[in-house]
Amino acid sequence: MEHEYGYFTETDSIDVVIARNRVVGNERLKEVMPVIIRKLHEAVKEIESTQEEWLEAILFLTRTGHMCDDWRQEFILLSDVLGVSMLVDAINNRTPGAASESTVLGPFHMKGAPLREMGANICLDAKGEDMVVSGRILDTAGHPVADALIDVWQANDEGFYDVQQRGIQPEFNLRGVFRTGPDGRYWFRAVKPKFYPIPNDGPVGQLLEMLGRHPYRPAHLHYILSAPGFATLTTHVFDPDDPYIHSDAVFGVKESLIAKFELVRDAERSKALEFAGDFWDVKHDFVLVRAKDQAA
Amino acid sequence: MEHEYGYFTETDSIDVVIARNRVVGNERLKEVMPVIIRKLHEAVKEIESTQEEWLEAILFLTRTGHMCDDWRQEFILLSDVLGVSMLVDAINNRTPGAASESTVLGPFHMKGAPLREMGANICLDAKGEDMVVSGRILDTAGHPVADALIDVWQANDEGFYDVQQRGIQPEFNLRGVFRTGPDGRYWFRAVKPKFYPIPNDGPVGQLLEMLGRHPYRPAHLHYILSAPGFATLTTHVFDPDDPYIHSDAVFGVKESLIAKFELVRDAERSKALEFAGDFWDVKHDFVLVRAKDQAA
């Protein structure tokens, strides 16, 4: 039949395997598979894995697959801790210098969070250290962006999202959507988020331990920012003083995403904000790119 | 805390992720992880995968994991069809020129197959085309190897191993262990094996279809050959006239593993072998390497 194929040899392994594929009608797969095969074989050739090591890898992937269900995606966690999720995010969100950078979405976004009045407190259970967050949504020329939607969500002061504590936290706790006016300004009240571990009771947690790494993500607020005519931005804002700011388990931190978290001891400002005492003041501007300027 | 880490950037992604790992007490993991991370990131950078494609890959791996159970190892199948299993086999079985080459073990070896008299018929249900297999076990200098154990197993003429058809085929059908005498010769009777598909009702089967590939392995006999003082050899012998000899789904064929399968029409020889009529004559010598000469 197909006599043009060579038989397998260690030296020619990449060419032999690639030559076997005869993808029809899927140009992208035709392009992608040779890269996957080449890099996979290059890795095995460089590692010179033993049969036992190869089997260990097979069983690790199997355990990772078995850990996945409707609520847990262990392969995404694996991608996260190996920096692959951030790499894919970076490749798909190359922005001009002035624009705010993106970071990973994470698994805790909820569609349908309520649109709230500017200034609203998204903390519904009054637990945690008070925080006020404010800034502007700007375009790359520095002009305010009106009608921008700011979809924000965050963990509470124990490091849990509402969806992780149904029945303990109120529904849509620490979530909200805000819409900017002509001045592009936004502000809302919340509580200071806390660092938290990614799920580490599975194979990926074991891998992290073998790699001498902790499972924590530094405290952050999540944002999806959208506005008519602009590219949607999925990003975080981080607390610079978090103990894990330099070692996010999923590599989500970028220099430009670190905000100022200032502790304010000012009774008058506290009172005006309806806070009981000291509070955190977080200021951060976001710069959106016009959709037509987003790199392909 | 750990301020020497840089933050993630697309350009520095490989270094940032590798620098984060602090493996202690596992020199091999310390060596292997950077290669895995580098090749993984190189692949993603070259492919420039979209978020949707990345998710597709995650879901493919998840389905592959979910397909695995005590009887089915879909990740090994994936490794097989991407040529990785053969590559690992090749790396771990580099042999001097004269020696017989190895190939993959496959999932159907059974420990404890009966030791049989030289010449025995391993086909216990008399189904299929009669076949006699013979040859010598030699060392690399061409001298016969005595006391070599020849552990042979094969599919029947419908392409099934006994363990795939419990209750249909007799136990240990088409399996046996033979021991050579001082002349290093072996012979046994069996039936001509048939090509068969690897399990293709899962994600790997779907991948093969997308790649324009069939799931078949050309007809072969499996061998594990061992002898005191020699490196154990796991290999196959293939039928050169099989329709899939040039396109083994798992890349197991090597030129040197193709034997002669000669159809014999000779009433006298048939009678001597206790065959009813025409039969297949398969001649193949194996050359074993002394354990001390096996490449590390």
Image (cartoon, coloured by chain):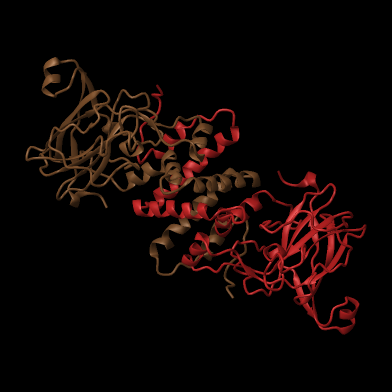
Chain colours: A brown, B red
Residue occupying the far left of the picture: A182
Residue occupying the far front of the picture: A167
Tell me the quarter of the image containing the N terminus of chain A.
Answer: bottom right
Q: Is A6 on the left-hand or right-hand side of A242?
A: right
Taking depth in this image into account, of A169 and A28 the one nearest to the observer is A169
At 54% from the left edge and 48% from the top edge, which residue is drawn?
A: A62
Q: Where is residue B8? Give x, y as percent.
A: 36, 36
Taking depth in this image into account, of A222 and A130 the one nearest to the observer is A130
In the rendered image, the vertical position of residue A100 relative to residue A17, given as above or below = above
Taking depth in this image into account, of B244 and A128 the one nearest to the observer is A128
At 52% from the left edge and 61% from the top edge, which residue is drawn?
A: B202
Residue occupying the far right of the picture: B182
Q: Quadrant of residue A159?
A: top left
In the rendered image, the vertical position of residue B178 relative to residue B33, given as above or below = below
Counting the numbered discs, the total is: 0
Q: Is B241 on the left-hand or right-hand side of B51?
A: right
Q: Is B20 on the left-hand or right-hand side of B233?
A: left
Q: Where is residue A75? Give x, y as percent.
A: 45, 46
In the rendered image, the vertical position of residue B83 relative to residue A140, given as above or below = below
Q: Where is residue B279? Give x, y as percent.
A: 80, 78
Q: Where is residue A224? Give x, y as percent.
A: 24, 42
